[in-house]
Amino acid sequence: MKKTVLITGGAGFIGSHLCELFIGKSCKVICVDNLITGKLSNISHLLKNKNFQFMKHNISEHINIKGPVDYILHFASPASPIDYLKFPIQTLKVGSLGTHNALGVAKAKRAKFLLASTSEVYGDPLVNPQSESYWGHVNCIGPRGVYDEAKRFAEAITMAYHRYHKINTKIVRIFNTYGEKMREEDGRAIPNFISQALNDKPITVYGRGDQTRSFCYVSDLIDGIYRLLMSAENYPMNIGNPNEMTILELAKEIIRLTDSSSRIIHKGLPTDDPKVRRPNISKAKKILKWQPKVDLEEGLISTINYFKSA
């Protein structure tokens, strides 16, 4: 019997890669997305596949799924600051009501459940790198709180369903990820910089650019998510690339790789923008035998080529 996989947010950046992964493993895939930030073009090549079903639906509202479901991967949510600041209420709803609804399906179907959480649960961290045992430093009433607290609540209700209803749950804390299928208007550093560089427009760096990030290529992330789903681990797991760099260094690297004539300009730093962001992946190395394989230059070249073709 084919396994059935329900993926919320399946037309989004990461969700669409997961749809491809499970179709490639001969699973039946039910992709649920209301297309608020997802793109139908991300999954259009799958629509004719007999094992693929697309449902345009807002997971924050009740959903009825017919037949058995083996795995549920809950990836529905605006994920970039430009999106969750534009859709603050929807972001809070999908983190709370949406997660509750998805867990309800998992309970009814006795399905294994994986929550897409985020490094943003650590807020503007006071420790670096961040390990899963760190509780975070979050401004719950700041503008970014709509995303941070939505994901923190999602983690809490996921663990409650695990403890109370004995659901087999997984939580992946995703650190900055990039690659094909990102939107040009995504608003995060890499798509912003690539789009600006390819058009020889000024590269916009917020603040002095000395804030740090670590960037994981999407194929490495997908591998880590799959390993976590198949593991016996029920507690949060960091998945990301621990190689840290400043945003200014990233901008200069993208200018070099695109051979762009763009110059760098600086704008004011957004409220509560984290000063550092780097995962401690010791747990993933030990339990999942996982670590990233794609170096930054290789991943950026692939992403730049995707943006050129798009």
Image (cartoon, rainbow, N blue to C red):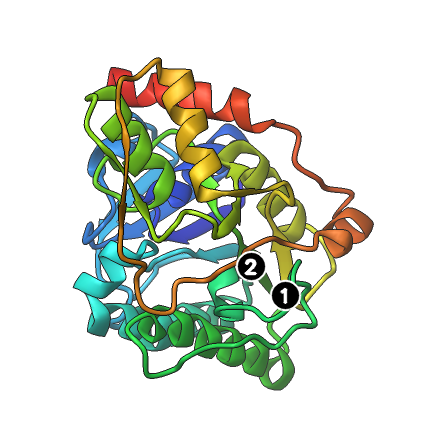
Question: Foreground residue, 114 or 275?
Answer: 275
Give me the disc on residue 236: 1
Q: Quadrant of residue 220?
A: top right
Q: Quadrant of residue 241?
A: top right
In this image, 112 relative to 56: left or right? right
Three-letter code for the amino acid on which mark 2 is drawn: Arg
Q: Residue at x 37, y 23 (%)?
A: 255
In this rendering, the answer to whether 259 lies above or below 249 is above
Q: Residue at x 42, y 28 (%)?
A: 252
Helix, strand or loop at mark 1 = loop
In this rendering, the answer to whether 69 lies above or below 234 is above
Q: Is residue 197 visible?
A: yes
Q: Is residue 101 visible?
A: no
Q: Quadrant of the N terminus?
A: top right
Circle 1 crowding by C-alpha within 10 Å: few under 14, some 14–19, many from 20: many
In this rendering, the answer to whether 82 lies above or below 103 is above
Give me the disc on residue 244: none
Residue beneath disc 2: 173
Helix, strand or loop at mark 2 = strand
Q: Position of residue 92 (x, y in %)?
A: 30, 74
Number of residue marks? 2
Q: Position of residue 146 (x, y in %)?
A: 31, 74
Q: Residue at x 26, y 15 (%)?
A: 309
Real-space CA distance between mark 2 and mark 1, rounded to the nearest whole angstrom: 7 Å
Q: Quadrant of the C terminus?
A: top left
Circle 2 crowding by C-alpha within 10 Å: few under 14, some 14–19, many from 20: many
Question: Foreground residue, 10 or 2?
Answer: 10
In this image, 102 relative to 196: left or right? right
Could you tell me if the residues under marks 2 and 1 are in contact, i.e. CB atoms within 8 Å? yes
